[in-house]
Amino acid sequence: MATNGYKILLPTDGSYPAIAATVRAIEMAKDRKAKLIILHVNEPITPAGMERIAEESVLMRTAGIDGVAYAKDVAAKAGIPTEVIIREGAVVGEIIRTATEKQVDIIVMGSSTIKGLPGLYLGSVSRGVIKEAPCDVVVVKLTEDEMKKAVQLAQEIAAAMKRPAVKFDISDITSLKKFKVGIGLLVVYSITYIIFTVLGTFVKNPDSPQGLSFFSLQMFGMNLGVIFGMVVIFMAIIMAVAFNWYAGRSENGEGGE
Amino acid sequence: MAYEFKPVAFGLFVLITAITLVISIYAARRVRTAGHYYVAGGGVKWFVNGIAFAGDYLSAASFLGIAGLIAFSGYDGFMYAIGFLAGWIIALFLIAEPLRKIGKYTFGDALAAKFKDRRVRLMASISAIVVSVFYLIPQMVGAGSIIQPLLGLEYELGVLIVGLVVVLIVAAAGMVSTTWVQFIKGFLLLFAALGLTIGVLYVAGMGPIEFIGHFVNNPSITVPTADGGQKIYAGEAFMSPGIKYKDPWDFASLALGLILGTAALPHILIRYYTVPKPSDARKSTVVAIIAIGTFYALVLFLGLGANYFQTLDPTNQNLSAPLLAEHIGGEVFFAVISSIAFATILGTVSGLIMAASGAIAHDIYTEFMGKRGDDRKTLRVSKITAIAVGFLAIILGIVMKGQNVAFLVGLAFAIAASANIPALICMLFWKRTTSQGVIAGILVGLVLSIGLIFVSPTFMGTEEALFSLYNPGIISIPVGFAVTIGVSLLTSKSNSRDEKESNVKG
């Protein structure tokens, strides 16, 4: 299908509202012979992990499927040309940036269905986009029936889209050499920590009649325990800084991660 | 020790707590609104994330618990602090980057993605719930401890109030505190520790080395006991290991649990996903290690300072640092320090309750039981769970009255390390790990570590205890590994046959 240059931007995160918006965006793209730009924003500011999971489960924001794959799949079936953009950043900001850069004609997006206090608490992406957008914004609100159908379709597609198993092995790590250096430092630190624990608890001070540990020996007006303890603390800091310096250098050398 | 109601302190305390809550609500909104667009969509800076790590980690245990342990048990408390720090080195070098590479958010998610077995997710979420509940106990004990001198209320009433407030917050809206809030808390904690340390040295009129030397060479260091008496230690004994842990194996067990526990705490590892790039994740870990290391170097002076000025409540070790603050800087300083500690606890408790209810509602109810699609019911399940976990935490907090917070956290670390570390390490670094191995490993690690705690001197008293060590780590962690590896070896053959068959069919 040839497009007449009309561009629709569809931001999606795989949530139910986004699935709903996908359905509408594709209908609109068909009518207007438009190109569909599918945007997914990885938000680096997620609420700290546990809160994120809790939020997801409490609000059920995700339909548990890959929103981009879903949109691509449905668009392909309808014969609509698509472009996929994955961005990282603040959701609203990235949507606006993409819309400006791609000079889209319209943004089609879902409205969060969070009601009541949590809705007030979380704010809303759509509100932010409407406020900042350089073009028209359509906030999709499906009827309950349409929503049910969309969800059902989404789940069918999710079931059909077998997610590839995550295959991980150690060689996949960005830089094996860097990882080996890390393991090396870890071994050195672990040995120091083990020596620290063993000296402190199992080895006795030969001069002590009460059988105190080695750490009760004195040096420079302090005892060995405090000196050794501070060494273990500062060693952790120095190793971490050194590893960071090394990793930063090797990344720059390799042209960054 | 009896405490009176302190109106000025209480007023300040309410104010600071309220400010923290407002910031957390504001920050949570900001993340998702246009406002965030104006900060250039840059994401969390690694420095902010690093301090937030410290804010997350240095909760009740470090500030209240370790200072108290050092004040009452001398050097053994300091060894605790070093163990807590050592855990970060493992997290930095061994776990963080590979786990981030898998690209999942939680330990359970990573396991579920690798082994497509619903039972793995179930086991991981059960483990998450148990660890959360055990981590909740010290937070509740810490919160109750702080309320006591502020309001002059009974400890039990304090725990109840804190629990109800948190349950209300969680059940009504869901606590979406953000990185920024943790960042502010982390910074305040660091400054509080630094300020208190300087105050201690200034009031004592000694330099840092001289101050420690004073303890080492003091022939009689007094520690009050709960029955109104006091114990006297020679300085060299107080400043070397052995006062809390008479049996060296006890400390070895604790050390193992602490060093492996950090990397097994899902809410710590999760923070690697809040920065834009893997290199930022690494940098923020380094910031965290610097911040936490500095804090633990300072906490030695806080604990010793509490002993020096005898700001000790023998019925509640956790009050050593706040009472020291009161001695050094009066009621206002006391209120500020207590509020910072309290705000940290509030955030951590809400987060833990959310995590536990999230695990039940998301992992067990939705994923395992397959109740997908009915949002209202899921929401209700998670709210009911949050309330139930909240009340469980209140009860456990009251039962554990008087226990040292750092000690209780040590138990939570041991459970986390026993249940999760074998699964995590094997999954990342050993190809032959099977889902059955992981399930058996988590189950055995969980049951064994908790079982050993219940027959330990903590619950049964020193005389009757069936297991003589306070911390189960040295037994339960290796057993967890052995079971994970053993069961994996036993089941790997039949699994590979299954895979081949399914390949032929596919």
Image: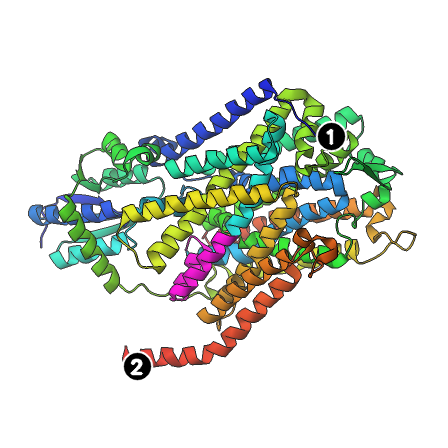
Query: Residues in magenta?
Result: B104-130
Q: Position of residue B250 (x, y in %)?
A: 72, 56
Chain letter of the residue beneath label 2 in the structure image? B
Asked whether residue B106 is drawn in magenta, I would say yes
Q: Main secondary structure of the magenta part?
A: helix
Q: Position of residue B301 (x, y in %)?
A: 73, 35
Residue beneath disc 1? B311
Quadrant of the snapshot with the C terminus of chain B: bottom left
Asked whether residue A148 is drawn in magenta, I would say no
Q: Is residue B356 above or below residue B504?
A: above
Quadrant of the snapshot with the N terminus of chain B: top right
Within 10 angstroms of label 1, few (less than 14), some, or many (20 or more) residues?
A: many
**Labelled pair 1, 2 in contact (Cβ < 8 Å):** no
Chain letter of the residue beneath label 1 in the structure image? B
Residue beneath disc 2? B504
Residue closest to the far left: A31
